[in-house]
Amino acid sequence: MSKAQVDHHHEEGIALTNTQQDRDALEYDDEEEVEDIVDSFEEEGWLTRCLHPFVNVIVLLHYHWIYNRLQFVLGSIATVMILLLVTGVVEKLDGPKNSLDGLFANHRDAHIRNIPYWTTINSKLDLKRDMIDHWCLDGSNNNCECADPFIPEAKFMDENWRKAAKLNHKAVKKAVQNKFEVKYSHMDEEQKDETTHEYAEERTKSTFRTLDVLFLGSSNTEARTGREIGVEKDDLKGIKSTFETQFQTNSSDYTGMALGIAGDTAVNLLWRIIHGGEVHPDMDPKVYWVSIGINDLIAAQCSEEVTLVGIINVVEELKIRKPNAFIVINSILPVHTGKDVLESNGKALGHWRSLNAINVVLHSFAKNTKKVKFFDGSKVFAKVDDGNLCVRGELYADNFHLNRKGQKMWGKAQIDFLHDLIPRYYDDPFAGDV
């Protein structure tokens, strides 16, 4: 090796040594600076010592930003993406999957975003237990008294409930018997032979009107009979009188019968339909009006999904038993809790978040199902006030039950709805003798 080469390598070594010394010095200075910072925090007292872990994190981030900048940036991006995926923000950024996503995007309970999926349900065959994400309103599966929505359930342990169920069954039998008594009024018992020509002619003779609509539900429906869980109530006599005037006189546009039991859920109504005799094979009203679901959601604390399954099962059972009848699903009515605002700036509040979500899906189900209609009760029991949607508290006796004025408004709206569904008695060329 020549002297020039030796000198060249010597100079390179000196340069490398100086660079390494500078780097060591820099790291040493950084370490001393960090120690000084930590020492100063420790001298400040217990508060600064509590902040010590945060200082270490800051120092660590500062170090990686200087010496591992590329890895730091890539790691930060990956961390943010993971957080977005976990919180569901990415799903929002992807855009709505269907027209209902925007309605539920701001719901306080993230699980309610699953509900738009149920708009694809068109029949009972589409319902399966494994479709239910959770059973309870709080998002859990154990913190509620929610029954299996696929299994009819009676309240046999409740004496008043048994009494109410028997009264409903008795009312149905009486309606059926009265209809036959009218039709057979000119025939002896021996002549009531379905195989005879006289029997066929007698079935066409009657001066009595047939039943147009059968109302099935819980407390607000039972109140129309003047009872609460089978017990006559003085404060419900006015509601009974109002219902009779609207649906049970010769001047009524439509004849109607109310079969309800206060406190019932969808599975209780399902039992009454299947086993309780409330849907009689020999009684064929043109419309079955279903008002159920509030006790599933509020009293039993069932999730929105379970409540939907229960209501749809009731409707599907009626479709099977009475394929020629119309079935009207009454929306779950707003709850009057004293805080009358249901929606503010387009955002649903309180119980209305869940109730409205269920009603939207029920409306979609009705539109996609033959001979099933949806009645929006919020048009009667809610109003827009100063840009907010508010419950009409003057129509309620308490949080859930309608007063006489509310019942009258409900009945009037139902009659108007029926005008678009079936002909009135006096407009029907086939009405009269049955």
Image (cartoon, rainbow, N blue to C red):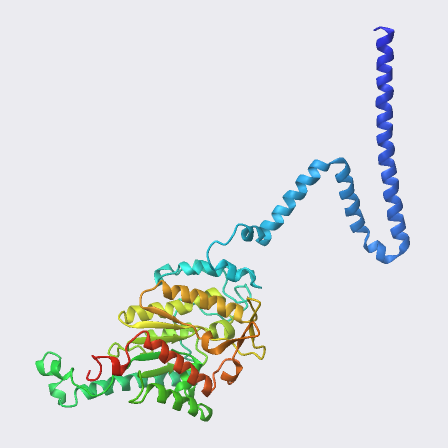
Question: Which quarter of the picture shows residue 119?
Answer: bottom left
* Residue located farthest toward the front when viewing the structure as drawn: 386
* Residue located farthest toward the right when viewing the structure as drawn: 43
Location of the N terminus (image quadrant) = top right
Work out whether residue 123 or residue 208 is closer to the camera in this orientation and state it: 208
Q: Is residue 396 visible?
A: no
In the rendered view, would you say 135 is above or below 234? above
In the rendered view, would you say 206 is above or below 126? below
The spot of residue 414 in percent (x, y) is 38, 79
Location of the C terminus (image quadrant) = bottom left
Work out whether residue 379 or residue 154 is closer to the camera in this orientation and state it: 379
Work out whether residue 359 or residue 296 is closer to the camera in this orientation and state it: 359
Give the total number of marks visible in the rendering. Answer: 0
In the rendered view, would you say 228 is above or below 284? below
Residue 318 is left or right of residue 207, and the answer is right
The spot of residue 92 in percent (x, y) is 55, 53
Question: Which quarter of the picture shows residue 429?
Answer: bottom left
Q: Is residue 176 visible?
A: yes
Q: Could you tell me which residue is drawn at 10 percent across and 78 percent down?
A: 195
The spot of residue 350 in percent (x, y) is 57, 71
In the rendered view, would you say 331 is above or below 59? below
* Residue located farthest toward the left when viewing the structure as drawn: 197
The spot of residue 112 in percent (x, y) is 52, 62
Question: Which quarter of the picture shows residue 25?
Answer: top right
Residue 182 is left or right of residue 365, and the answer is left
* Residue located farthest toward the bottom when viewing the structure as drawn: 234
